Image: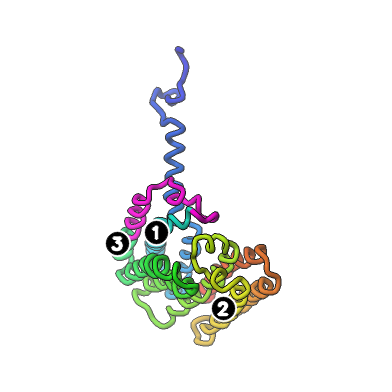
Amino acid sequence: MEGHVSAGTVAGGGLPAAPPARAGAALALARDYVALTKPRIIGLLLVTTVTTMAVARPSGLSLALILWTVLGGYLAAGGAGAINHYVERDRDARMDRTCDRPIASGRIRPRAGLAFGVALGALAVAELALAVNPLAAGLALAGLLGYVFVYTLWLKPRTPQNIVIGGAAGAIPPLVGWAAATGGLDLDALFPFAIVFLWTPPHFWALALLVSDDYARVGVPMLPVARGEGTTRRLIVGYTLGLVAFTLLPYFTGLFGPVYLACALGLGAGFIGLAAILAARPSQAWALRLHLASVAYLALLFGAMAIDRLV
């Protein structure tokens, strides 16, 4: 009809517009590829990276250095996440929590997801080596390889200690931040690394309590499946006590001052309290509260580290 503007034409310009269905499909595909990188997990890792940079060099950091380090950290962790989606696609498809993931659900072809992850990892190493320094690049690569090969492929399907040992891969970002800020590593760099390492088991076990049926269904020996939920709750309390005790050590070595000490004591008391409540009043609601609170705990503790050093 004369004067009618069709759905495929831009009003007033006479130029063909992308069909809404095609544009929507492209956007959905882009969201799926972003989901492969596990962005919610990466956000916390980048917090530990940037705050550790401030701890390592409180005299000042250039914005460019921070941004290049954050970009490289995202690419490395995102690549590891995408490869993890590929490796675990069959198990993911059988678990309620993960069955809608892009590869497990069939929205992204497995080989495409694997290629995406490998490409992100390679780009991360190249970018960090060129824009930051080779040590930061090497550490990021070690974290990626550790997460994929040591944790996902070797430890996870074989032992309930998987997250205890494999958690070292998730503790690499603070080392990347320290190396990016200083060009090297020293003994003080081990404190933020060890804090994340010790924090990982109680954080993850709280989640495992929520989805233990899923892990049992696919035969993954997570702690609640292999040792029972009661043992898991008791170990959460024990690891949390050990974590909080360790977080006080950097104050006594002189790395941090009273601002950090006050925050570490307050945050630690809250974390221990929630773990004790979960042990005394077992429920999924308290497991979820502890899991979410553990995320806030780590972010706030690392924020306290940076603030203490800067002031």
Amino acid under disc 2: Tyr
The answer to whether residue 24 is above or below residue 45 is above
Say whether disc 2 or disc 1 marks the residue closer to the N-terminus: 1
Magenta highlight range: 94-121
- Amino acid type, residue under disc 1 in the picture: Val
What label sits on residue 126 in the rendered view?
3
Q: Where's residue 6, x and y in %? A: 45, 21
Residue 263 disc label? none
Q: Which mark is residue 87?
A: 1
Callout 2 touching callout 3 (CB < 8 Å): no
Within 10 Å of disc 2 (Cα), the crowding (few <14, some 14-19, many 20+) is some
Residue at 64% over, 76% down = 272
Furthest residue in direction bottom, as rendered: 252
- Report the residue that reaches farthest toward the top: 2
Mark 3 and mark 1 lie on one chain; the one further toward the N terminus is: 1
* Residue at position x 32%, y 58% in the image: 123
Whichever of labels 2 and 3 marks the residue nearer the N terminus, that label is 3
Judge by depth and name the residue closer to the eye, 158 or 146. 158
The secondary element bearing badge 1 is classed as helix
Q: Return the x and y of residue 217 as percentages of the image width and height.
A: 53, 60
Residue 290 showing in the rendered view: yes
Provide the residue designation for mark 2: 239
Mark 3 or 1, closer to the camera:
1
Helix, strand, or loop for circle 3?
Answer: helix
Q: Mark 2 against mark 1, which lies toward the viewer?
A: 1
Type of the residue with mark 3: Ala
